[in-house]
Structure formats: structure tokens, C-alpha cells
Image: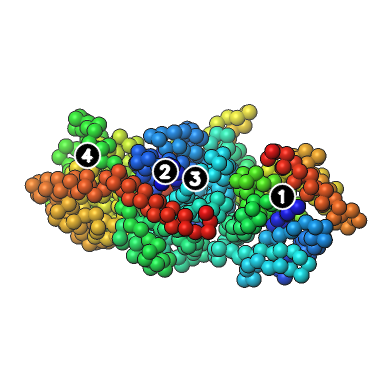
């Protein structure tokens, strides 16, 4: 298990994916807005957007429009990806 | 024991939530125990689309919300998940009027919950160690030490510690200073009937998706992490290609994925390696069936379920001579053993199997027989049930009853 | 009546003002014929003691020594607190009336025991994460807040030491005001108010049990 996943040890967007997992954005009901993610990961919105885009291309993150606001959450593949890093 | 024995299994993964070997292990063990007259409750983490509560093959499964509390890091996430798991499990046991005889925890990931439930309900705790922190990555840094200490704490609180190979038994003795009589060896099993039935006659059409007809398929199944030795396999590729035309098919995902992919590209051999990522059960079984050789090049391997699966699927096997693999495979009888962390030795082993059809056939048949005899889940769950009964007998003589 | 108080500090371990407050509370309870147990943390003075004022203490240490912050430290320590509390519970033939959780640290244990034994608890708020961290909302803060939230939701009653705190609890955690009781530490009815709260929670539980 790579128990100590630190920035730089794996690609940026994967480190970001692990953070999203740890803060619990793992289902549509638990999805988070760009602003919330930016605040909780202490990352600038542009960087967050960049990472989200890469993750959505790789089908690890999905977005949905809830009450007119775009929210993001991990897909099943995304969850699996994170768990395989930690196990 | 006149009343039915009731066991609550605590595990962070259970199908469809599959990460590594714990998931199939707990699933097969639970199912077999249920067939053997044991009432099994499984408490595990939630997973998209999986129901919160269901009964499958006689096993009652509860999935708890494990993403309720935002966490700054993974270990904190694990401990918070344990807080939730423990609370929900306590409510479940309360609803059952306390009718759970044993708590069985799988790995450090459910340590807090298992230990808590043991003390709350004053029932014995059993712990199965599928792997250890010190074995995987050492315990040099603070983070790793936390996990190691949590593992130690679990072994301390457990009535018995179950390991899946003799290698793991001596490893656990060393890592945790455990006395002999606390340790029990029960190997993992494989559900070989799953390979026997559902035989897909049209594998040639399936095969085409992964390799050209003139390419022999060399299959790896496992997590793409350092201890599984996939980088050693990649390094063996060019040597293998000198002797035989192959396609490496690599099934699984993990943190080394990008590094391995870059390694392959750097060698100019991207057309000879396919990274499939995670695949569904049926695809996996079919791949294992049509592979010309299965490779398990692990550097650290407590057991090696991938080896058992290859044996059950009827695919010749090349493994690192290490850990549990050394116990499962008999060199030149049920498979080929090579030096761990040695690309040349690995290349030699692979070529040996691919170039000698009669030899490969022999290995395959011996392996299949062995898997039926020794690694059948029904026999293994019977051994587990015996451990439960032994522990409960000792427990009945303690002041907790 | 038999009460178990959870507090992360108790003399000789003094971190803030809570240690002495809990000692005084426990001493007064004993004077009022309440059998009082305090489960608390100490690095090495572990075990059960009968303190001079008749308070029964049960000190536990952390089963995991290495941590990366207060969160993991608290979460593993909870298991030992749980062990101590259940020992008290079984030793007294399961006749514990309630748990008084002083601050957020041992809420996980209180909630598990409530689910396991239908044992009610009171959440005595000493401080809130929003105030301690000045409204910071990193995952670390959110995690602690979620534990406080759990306590607010599962407690039979929430006890605070000022009306300001009462308003804050209602504002931040959206708890109905009726569930939050103000017990002023310096008032002359301080111990009487505490006892009343305890009795009403204990009585409420008995009614449910029957």
C-alpha cells in the first residue's frame, strides 16, 4: 500500500482524486461544487478546474447539474482507482 | 454447540466493492460458512448501486455510509469510517438481542470497529491478516508507523490471528512478536467451480480483442503497486521477445500505472503490452482461461490468490519464489518458480513454459488437481469454523460469560 | 443514580479549564449521592482509582502511540474509553443511568454505547470547532464539526455554559432551542440544574426501556 501519498509522488490529478475521496464526494448526493472543493482542498479554482477536467476525461469524476449548480463526484471507476492506491 | 454459531465479519471491501484479495476472500468464506451451518453477518462499506441491506447466498450483508465525515487524509478516513461502522454494527447487534458469538475483522482497516465491538459486547475477536504494513512498505515514517501500530493493537486484542500462509505466520511472529499459540494458518481458497462451469467455447473471438493470433498471451492480474513486481515483468519483456512472440496483458490498476506505462513506451514496446485497467469478472475469467501463461512476479506476497486462480483456470503458472507463492507452487510440478526481482530469471521461466507444450500441459494438469484437493473453499471454511468453535470453548471458560 | 462522565482532561492532567470544572462537578455530584465515574485520559497513570472526594476515576492511555494530529489521536483513544466505560457498565450489572460527555472528544464512544445499550448521553459543550478554528473549513475542521454534529444529533440533551453558546449551538448546528439547556457554572443553582438535567434524561430513558 502506498500509505503516504504525497504531492509529487503520483500525478497531480490522482492526488487530487484521493483528496476528493477522503472528503467524501463519492456519490451524486454527496457531490460538491467547484467553490466547495476549492475551499476544502485549499487549491485555486483554476487548478481545481484543471484537475477536474482531466479526471472527467478519464471517467473518474462525473458532474451533474443539481438545482442549477454544477456539482462533482467520483464515479465507480474513480472510487476503485483511489482504493487501489491505498491497498 | 446446539444453537447456530453467529459470526459478524467486518471488512472494508466486499463485492461489488473490490480492491484486492480481501473482497473475494470474505465473500467466498462467508458463503461457504453459511453452507456449513454458520449464520454470517457482513458489515462493510457502501458502494454505488449496492443495496444497504441484502441477503446473498445465505449471507446477510449490511453496507454502511463510509463517506459521512470529510477527512484530511486516508488514515483519518479509515478511523472515521470505523466510527460509523462500529456504531451501525452496535445497533445491528442490539437489534439481534446480542446474538452474535464472534467478531471477525479483516486487516487493520477495521481494527477500531472490531476492537470496540469486542469490548462492548464482550465477545471474542478474531483477526485475519491478509498483509502487513511492514511487509508492504516498512514503518519508517510517522504515517506508516501509525498503520503498523494499529495492526499491532489489533493482534493484541484478537483472540486468534489468522494468516493465510506459513510465510505470513512467521512474518507476523516477527512483525508483532506474537506467540505461537495465538497464530493459526488457514490458506485462502479459490472458487474453482466458477471456472469449471460457464465454459465459453468461443474464446477465439474473445482472444482477438487482446492479442494477434500469432502472439502468445502472458497474463498478469493484480494491483499495479510496487510489491506486485509488475516493473520486473515489464523489464523481462524484451528478453522474452528474443525467444517467443508474446503480448503482455496487464489487468488491474494502482498507483504505478503511469510509471509502468512510461517504462513500456520508453522501451518502444507499447504495441506489445496492453493495460486493461479493471475488468469485470467474466472478462477476467475468460482471460485467465485463454492465457498461454499466467505470471505472478511479486516481491512481497502473503499468499497469492492470482496463482490459485490461474491454476483453477487451467493456465500454466510462473511465479516468484517468495512468500505464500513458494508454498502454493511446486517447481516443475504445478508451476515454474523463478528468482524474485530478477527479470532474466522471469524471462527464462516464461519462455520455458511457452516453448515446451508438453511441459506446460503437465504443469497445468497437476496444478488443477492440487487446487481441487487443497484449496477448495468448503474445506477451508470448515477449518475456519473449527477455529471459531475452539475459541468459543475457551471463551466459555473465561469470566466474560 | 449512577453517572459516567467522559472528559479528556481531569486532574492531575490539566490542559484548560475543563479539568477543574469536571472535578468540581463530580465532587458535588458525589455529595448529592450520585455514584460518579470519570473516564479520562492520562499518558501513564492508567487504571481505576477512588479519588479523595469519592469520585471513581478510570484513566486510560492511547493504544496507538504515533499520530499525525489530534484527530487520529482522539479516534484511537475512543476505543480505550469505550473499553473502560463498558467495564463500568458490566461491573455495575448494566445499571448506568447516563453518560455525560464533556466536549467533543469522546462523542464516538457515547454514540456507540447508546446504540448498543440504549444508554442515553448528555453532550456538555465546552467549545465549538467553529470558534476554536475561527471558522476555518479544511477537511480537518469539517471532520471535527461532523463529530460535534453527531453528538448534537444523538444526545438526549445538550448542556451549555452560557446563553451565547446556546445561540451558537442553535445557529451552527440547527438544534431546536428546547434541547439546549443553559447551566451557568457560577450560579447558585449550578449543581441543582445539572442534577435536574441528569434526572430528566435518566427518567426519560427508563420510560423508553419499559
Q: Which residue is mark 3?
A: B100
Picture coordinates of residue B381 (x, y %)? 33, 46
Q: Is residue A68 left or right of residue B244?
A: right
Picture coordinates of residue B232 (x, y %)? 28, 57
First in residue order: circle 3 vs circle 2: 2
Q: Secondary structure at mark 2?
A: loop
The chain to which mark 3 is attached is: B
Pointer 4 with pointer 2, Cβ within 8 A:
no
Residue density around tag 4, few if under 14, some if 14–19, many if 20 or more, within 10 Å? many
CA separation in Å, label 3 and label 1: 25 Å
Residue at the image position 78 percent from the left and 41 percent from the top: C179
Which of B122/B361 is in front? B122
CA separation in Å, label 1 and label 2: 36 Å
Q: Is residue A76 left or right of residue C22?
A: left
Residue at the image position 65 percent from the left and 44 percent from the top: C118
Q: Which residue is mark 4?
A: B289
Pointer 1 with pointer 2, Cβ within 8 A:
no
- Image mark for residue C97: 1
The chain to which mark 4 is attached is: B
Q: Which residue is mark 2?
A: B2
Asked whether the residues under marks 4 and 2 belong to the same chain, the reply is yes
First in residue order: circle 3 vs circle 4: 3
First in residue order: circle 4 vs circle 2: 2
Which of C90/B378 is in front? C90
Q: Residue furthest front?
A: B2
- Image mark for residue C67: none
Residue at the image position 35 percent from the left and 58 percent from the top: B184
Which of C188/B216 is in front? C188
CA separation in Å, label 3 and label 2: 15 Å
Residue density around tag 3, few if under 14, some if 14–19, many if 20 or more, within 10 Å? many
Q: Nearer the viewer, mark 1 or mark 2?
A: 2
Amino acid at each position: 500500500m502506498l500509505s503516504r501519498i504525497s504531492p509529487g509522488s503520483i500525478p497531480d490529478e490522482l492526488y487530487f482524486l484521493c483528496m476528493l475521496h477522503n472528503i467524501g464526494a463519492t456519490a451524486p448526493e454527496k457531490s460538491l461544487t467547484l467553490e466547495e472543493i476549492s475551499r476544502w482542498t485549499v487549491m485555486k479554482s483554476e487548478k481545481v478546474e484543471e484537475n477536474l477536467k482531466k479526471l472527467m476525461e478519464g471517467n473518474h469524476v462525473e458532474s451533474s447539474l443539481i438545482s442549477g449548480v454544477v456539482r462533482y463526484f467520483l464515479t465507480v471507476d474513480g472510487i476503485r482507482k483511489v482504493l487501489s492506491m491505498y491497498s | 454447540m446446539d444453537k447456530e454459531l453467529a459470526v459478524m465479519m467486518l471488512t472494508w471491501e466486499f463485492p461489488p466493492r473490490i480492491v484486492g484479495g480481501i473482497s473475494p476472500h470474505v465473500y467466498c468464506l462467508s458463503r461457504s460458512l453459511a453452507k456449513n451451518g454458520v449464520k454470517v453477518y457482513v458489515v462493510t462499506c457502501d458502494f454505488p448501486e449496492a443495496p444497504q441491506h441484502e441477503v446473498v447466498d445465505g449471507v446477510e450483508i449490511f453496507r454502511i455510509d463510509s463517506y459521512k465525515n470529510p477527512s484530511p487524509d486516508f488514515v483519518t478516513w479509515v478511523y472515521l469510517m470505523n466510527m460509523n461502522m462500529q456504531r451501525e454494527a452496535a445497533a445491528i447487534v442490539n437489534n439481534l438481542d446480542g446474538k452474535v458469538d464472534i467478531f471477525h475483522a479483516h486487516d487493520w482497516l477495521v481494527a477500531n470497529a472490531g476492537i470496540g465491538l469486542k469490548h462492548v459486547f464482550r465477545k471474542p475477536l478474531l483477526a485475519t491478516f491478509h498483509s502487513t504494513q511492514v511487509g508492504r512498505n516498512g514503518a519508517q515514517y510517522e504515517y506508516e508507523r501509525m498503520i503498523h501500530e494499529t495492526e499491532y493493537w489489533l493482534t493484541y486484542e484478537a483472540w486468534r490471528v489468522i494468516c493465510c500462509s506459513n510465510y505470513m505466520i512467521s512474518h507476523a511472529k516477527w512483525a508483532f512478536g506474537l506467540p505461537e499459540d495465538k497464530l493459526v494458518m488457514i490458506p485462502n481458497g479459490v472458487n474453482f467451480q466458477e471456472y469449471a462451469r460457464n465454459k465459453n467455447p468461443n474464446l477465439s473471438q474473445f482472444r482477438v480483442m487482446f492479442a494477434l493470433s500469432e502472439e502468445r498471451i502472458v497474463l498478469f492480474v493484480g494491483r499495479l503497486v510496487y510489491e506486485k513486481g509488475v516493473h520486473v515483468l515489464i523489464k523481462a519483456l524484451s528478453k522474452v521477445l528474443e525467444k517467443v512472440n508474446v503480448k503482455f496483458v496487464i489487468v488491474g490498476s494502482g498507483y504505478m500505472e503511469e510509471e509502468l506505462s512510461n517504462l513500456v513506451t520508453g522501451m518502444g514496446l507499447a504495441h506489445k503490452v496492453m493495460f486493461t485497467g479493471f475488468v469485470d469478472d467474466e472478462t477476467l475469467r475468460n482471460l485467465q482461461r485463454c492465457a498461454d501463461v499466467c505470471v505472478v512476479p511479486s516481491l512481497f506476497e502473503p499468499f497469492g490468490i492470482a496463482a490459485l486462480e490461474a491454476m483453477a483456470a487451467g493456465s500454466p503458472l510462473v511465479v516468484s519464489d517468495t512468500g505464500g507463492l513458494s508454498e502454493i507452487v511446486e517447481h516443475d510440478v504445478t508451476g515454474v518458480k523463478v528468482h524474485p526481482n530478477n527479470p532474466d530469471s522471469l524471462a527464462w521461466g516464461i519462455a520455458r513454459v511457452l516453448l515446451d507444450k508438453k511441459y506446460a500441459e503437465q504443469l497445468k494438469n497437476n496444478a488443477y488437481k492440487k487446487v481441487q484437493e487443497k484449496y477448495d473453499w468448503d474445506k477451508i471454511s470448515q477449518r475456519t469454523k473449527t477455529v471459531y468453535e475452539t475459541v468459543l470453548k475457551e471463551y466459555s471458560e473465561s469470566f466474560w460469560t | 443514580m449512577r453517572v459516567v462522565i467522559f472528559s479528556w482532561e481531569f486532574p492531575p492532567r490539566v490542559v484548560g479549564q475543563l479539568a477543574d470544572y469536571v472535578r468540581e462537578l463530580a465532587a458535588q455530584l458525589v455529595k448529592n449521592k450520585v455514584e460518579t465515574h470519570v473516564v479520562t485520559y492520562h499518558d501513564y497513570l492508567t487504571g481505576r482509582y477512588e479519588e479523595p472526594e469519592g469520585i471513581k476515576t478510570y484513566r486510560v492511555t492511547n493504544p496507538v502511540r504515533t499520530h499525525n494530529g489530534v484527530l487520529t489521536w482522539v479516534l484511537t483513544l475512543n476505543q480505550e474509553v469505550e473499553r473502560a466505560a463498558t467495564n463500568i457498565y458490566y461491573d455495575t450489572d448494566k445499571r448506568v443511568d447516563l453518560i455525560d460527555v464533556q466536549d467533543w472528544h469522546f462523542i464516538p464512544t457515547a454514540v456507540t454505547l447508546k446504540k448498543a445499550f440504549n444508554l442515553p448521553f448528555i453532550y456538555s459543550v465546552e467549545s465549538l470547532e467553529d470558534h476554536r478554528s475561527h471558522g476555518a473549513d479544511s477537511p480537518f475542521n469539517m471532520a471535527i464539526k461532523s463529530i460535534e454534529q453527531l453528538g448534537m444529533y444523538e444526545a438526549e440533551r445538550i448542556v451549555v455554559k452560557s446563553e451565547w453558546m446556546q445561540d451558537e449551538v442553535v445557529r451552527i448546528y440547527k438544534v431546536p432551542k428546547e434541547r439546549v439547556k443553559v447551566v451557568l457554572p457560577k450560579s447558585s443553582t449550578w449543581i441543582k440544574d445539572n442534577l435536574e438535567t441528569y434526572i430528566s434524561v435518566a427518567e426519560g430513558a427508563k420510560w423508553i426501556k419499559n
